[in-house]
Image: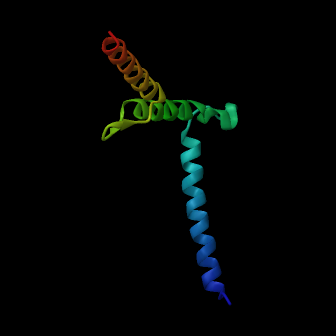
Amino acid sequence: MFSCVAVLQIQHEQMVYSRHIARFLDAVPGKKLGVYRFMPIYFVFGALLEFTMINWRVGNVNFCMFITALYSHIKKLQRLSIEVVSIP
């Protein structure tokens, strides 16, 4: 079982975290907007995530489906041109 000291210590730690979270939330401007005041942060985070997924390459693979589709289309055109050239 928990002793009274341990329970008080856990409550004190939760209050410290709550105080830090409350201080952070109060530092963000736009209290009249409520939770919607954090939307610009989410938009910026989403834009950065999308930018990195398009431009970041791991080896020869990236996360952009357009580039992958473009490469497969180019390979298909090359294969067709090789077949056209080899027919005559």
**Viewer-proximal residue among 69 and 58:** 69
Number of marks in the rendered image: 0
**Viewer-proximal residue among 48 and 63:** 63
Query: Which color scheme did the rendering employ for the protein?
Result: rainbow
Residue under the image location 69 percent in, 36 percent down: 34
- On the image, the x and y values in percent for residue 7 come to 65, 80
Residue under the image location 40 percent in, 34 percent down: 52
Please tell me in which quadrant of the rendered image residue 12 appears: bottom right
Residue under the image location 47 percent in, 31 percent down: 50
Residue under the image location 66 percent in, 85 percent down: 4
Task: Check the image and name the residue furthest to the front.
Answer: 88
- On the image, the x and y values in percent for residue 35 come to 67, 38
* Picture quarter with the N terminus: bottom right
Please tell me in which quadrant of the rendered image residue 62 appears: top left
Figure check: 13 above or below 22: below
Figure check: 15 above or below 77: below
* Picture quarter with the C terminus: top left
**Viewer-proximal residue among 53 and 31:** 53
- On the image, the x and y values in percent for residue 71 come to 39, 25
